[in-house]
Amino acid sequence: TWTMAGFRDAEIARIRAQVGDARVICGLSGGVDSAVAAALIHAAIGPQLTCIFVDHGLLRAGEAAQVVETFRDRFNMRLVHRDAGDLFLGALAGVTDPEVKRKTIGRLFVEVFEEEAQRLGGADYLAQGTLYPDVIESVSVTGGPSVTIKSHHNVGGLPERMRMRLIEPLRELFKDEVRALGRELGLPEAIVGRHPFPGPGLAIRIPGPVDAELVAILQRADAIFLEEIRAAGLYDAIWQAFAVLLPVRSVGVMGDGRTYDRVCALRAVTSTDGMTADIYPFDMAFLSRVAGRIVNEVRGINRVTYDITSKPPGTIEWE
Ligand code: XMP
């Protein structure tokens, strides 16, 4: 009978046979897929693997540190952590168009990754956490309808340009299977059970121009929302939950004073594949508690709304 432990062992043997004593580079993003790919390849070839974590500074609060802690400290992997927040924010300065944000981030990501790979002296193989749905989607993007609603930057021309052979050990798996494999490999639940997160990160959750201060404000609001969702035991019932920092200021009162600060929108949806989604029906007491905490604890936000649009006609992200 087929088991995930059996799949893991077979894949480890297959990777060992394929790679021999060659060197492999793997990009880590903080997401589930690249984490599981790295853990699997590390289980197969240990120090022949080096991971490159291009940190664009647009992850959730605390997640970059968690990536480093998990992979370098706990798994003892060779890990390059390139802290490139200033570079990305510099390139994003003044950019408002969502697709230009994506393209800017995607292009820089590849540039920084290549730079770090070259610094390592290159490698024979590049590992990617491509899943079966990514394979299908990238086929349908090129061969299917001519309208791209949002470009995704995670599957791209890296390997050809870098003259490395590609290893994609997850390309026959679906998300739930990848999670099961991650657990089999001993990855922490905080990584394996994590909600999907877009490659361009918080840049597409700040409509309008992005800067370091706005990213910091959004990280704080988002952390409160996620903390309350976890505390209420709702995390696993939700496909994605996040805060969006709107480019709108509204008037409020705080103590004796008038405030004129930003509006934050909360978004939480259920879904099975991200193609369609329903809003998560929080009770009002929960939403009101989160709103109270955000307005009281996050300077720069004085109003909170809940997005009640399903997909379609809305998309999950705001950009
Ligand atoms: P939308 O907003 O199109 O999102 O309903 C569907 C799913 O895709 C994620 N998403 C992205 N993921 N790069 C990514 O890697 C992107 O540019 C991107 N845009 C959206 C979104 O978070 C949701 O899971």
Image: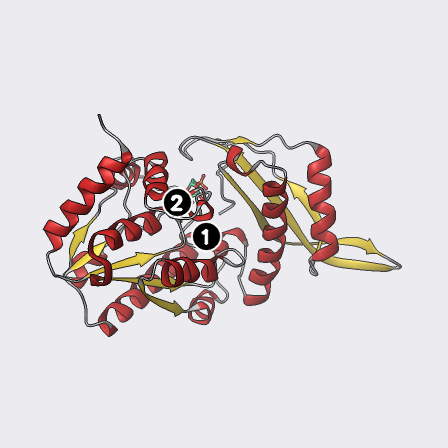
> Mark 2 vs ligand 1: CB under 8 Å?
yes
Q: Secondary structure at mark 1?
A: helix
User: How many other residues sit within 10 Å of disc 2, few (<14), some (14-19) or many (≥20)?
Assistant: few
Q: Residue at x 13, y 55 (%)?
A: 19
Compare residues 13 and 317 and report the one nearer the observer: 13
Q: Are marks 1 and 2 in contact (CB under 8 Å)?
A: yes
User: How many other residues sit within 10 Å of disc 1, few (<14), some (14-19) or many (≥20)?
Assistant: many
Q: Amino acid at mark 1?
A: Pro
Compare marks 1 and 2 and give the one earlier in the sequence. 1
Residue 190 place in picture, x, y as percent = 47, 47
The single residue placed furthest to the right in the displayed view is 256
Q: Which of the numbered marks, if any, corresponds to residue 150? A: 2
Q: Amino acid at mark 2?
A: Lys
Horizontal side of 123 relative to 274 (left or right) equals left
Horizontal side of 139 relative to 266 (left or right) equals left
Compare residues 270 and 63 and report the one nearer the observer: 63
Residue with the mark numbered 1 = 98
Q: Residue at x 59, y 51 (%)?
A: 222
Residue 50 place in picture, x, y as percent = 26, 63
Residue 300 place in picture, x, y as percent = 69, 60
Locate residue 241: give its quadrant: top right
The reply to whether residue 239 is in sight is yes
